[in-house]
């Protein structure tokens, strides 16, 4: 919506790395040349007007706002529409009933070239709405599109699943870059403490590596050097993996152990996943997510249940070892 846009800022359209290409995604280039997306205002036959323009004060989203907020947004829409029409030199061109919304001027064409650079309407990926009225129109269309992420933070929101590109600003990227460096320094500190030459914390390192899915070996079958190498790669890998590493390191030791116990239980079929989505141990329904199930197992009064789960998982592991 228009009230979310700061037209004085420069915005950038960036490609979302493809998680199915982890090596490319780790470098931030997991998008193939030729990837495109076209965004435009659609016509609603019932309303007899173009929708998703970002410049319609009678848009249902605007009309649903509280009266005081609605007036503020309505005034901004009228002001911006008249300003842009004056720059175009065609009054009424951006009216929601105007055929102007089927022109090249009101279409956003995003593409990735052979050089892996993102381009918007044939130029760079930078939108300068205060300098270029076509960029301002493009920005309005992108903000009006419910399926287009409006920030890098939005990329992780399930409601934007399948999105190819996202909007951001230099300010947001700068903040994320600074936060990323802080997280990396923190991750290195955890590594250094975990693999201290005089007192390596192998048990903790194994639990973290197992939590990240970096080892399936038993603790006595993997060396400190192997764990060090695996976790070092995690810290220097993708942002997602580094964040998961930090999550494990910052987690209470008991909680981390139970997370891994739950994982072992699932892998050994001691815990089953029901069609309804519940994790199921014996006659007990845990919860619908791993996080909720761990919290349930750690809840006061469930000590016996937790002990039984640990016993069953240990028994299953011994049986497998004996068979091997």
Image: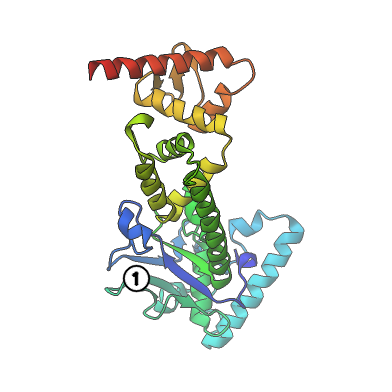
**Of 39 and 250, which appears nearest the observer?**
250
The crowd level at tag 1 (other Cα within 10 Å; few <14, some 14-19, many 20+) is: many
Above or below: residue 5 compared with residue 82: above
Q: How is the image coloured?
A: rainbow
Q: Would you name the residue on which mark 1 appears? A: 111
For the question of whether residue 53 can be seen, the reply is no
Residue at position x 58%, y 65% from top?
Answer: 175
**Of 19 and 211, which appears nearest the observer?**
211
Above or below: residue 201 compared with residue 188: above
Residue 187: where, in percent of width, then height? 51, 52
Q: Please tell me in which quadrant of the rendered image residue 301 appears.
A: top right
Q: Please tell me in which quadrant of the rendered image residue 277 appears.
A: top left
**Of 305 and 95, which appears nearest the observer?**
305
**Of 49 and 111, which appears nearest the observer?**
111
Residue at position x 55%, y 85% from top?
Answer: 131
Residue 16: where, in percent of width, then height? 40, 60
Above or below: residue 276 compared with residue 145: above
Q: Quadrant of the C terminus?
A: top left
Q: Please tell me in which quadrant of the rendered image residue 182 appears.
A: bottom right
Q: Quadrant of the N terminus?
A: bottom right
Residue at position x 28%, y 64% from top?
Answer: 32
Task: Please give left or right for residue 41 compared with residue 186 in the image.
Answer: left
Residue 210: where, in percent of width, then height? 40, 36
Q: Secondary structure at mark 1?
A: strand
For the question of whether residue 189 can be seen, the reply is yes
**Furthest-front residue in this view:** 198
């Amino acid at each position: 919506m228009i009230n979310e846009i700061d037209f004085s800022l420069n915005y950038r359209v960036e490609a979302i790395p493809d998680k199915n290409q982890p090596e490319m995604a780790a470098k931030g280039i997991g998008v193939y040349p030729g990837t495109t997306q076209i965004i435009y205002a659609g016509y609603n036959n019932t309303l007899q007007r173009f929708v998703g323009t970002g410049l319609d004060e009678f848009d249902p989203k605007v009309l649903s706002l509280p009266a005081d907020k609605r007036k503020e947004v309505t005034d901004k829409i009228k002001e911006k529409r008249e300003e842009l029409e004056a720059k175009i030199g065609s009054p009424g061109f951006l009216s929601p009933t105007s055929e102007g919304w089927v022109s090249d001027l009101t279409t956003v064409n995003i593409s990735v070239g052979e050089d892996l650079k993102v381009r918007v309407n044939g130029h760079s990926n930078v939108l300068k709405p205060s300098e270029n009225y076509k960029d301002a129109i493009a920005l309005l269309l992108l903000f009006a599109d419910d399926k287009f992420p409006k920030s890098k933070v939005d990329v992780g929101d399930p409601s934007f699943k399948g999105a190819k590109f996202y909007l951001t600003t230099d300010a947001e990227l700068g903040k994320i870059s600074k936060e990323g460096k802080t997280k990396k320094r923190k991750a290195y500190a955890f590594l250094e403490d975990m693999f201290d030459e005089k007192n390596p914390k192998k048990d903790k390192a194994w639990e973290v590596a197992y939590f990240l899915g970096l080892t399936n070996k038993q603790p006595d079958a993997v060396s400190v050097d192997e764990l060090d190498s695996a976790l070092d790669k995690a810290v220097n890998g993708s942002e997602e993996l580094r964040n998961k590493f930090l999550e494990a390191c910052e987690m209470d030791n008991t909680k981390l152990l139970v997370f891994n116990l739950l994982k072992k239980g699932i892998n050994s079929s001691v815990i089953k996943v029901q069609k309804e989505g519940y994790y199921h141990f014996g006659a007990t329904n845990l919860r619908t997510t791993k996080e909720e199930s761990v919290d349930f197992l750690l809840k006061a009064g469930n000590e016996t249940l937790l002990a039984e789960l640990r016993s069953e998982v240990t028994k299953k592991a011994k049986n497998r070892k004996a068979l091997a």
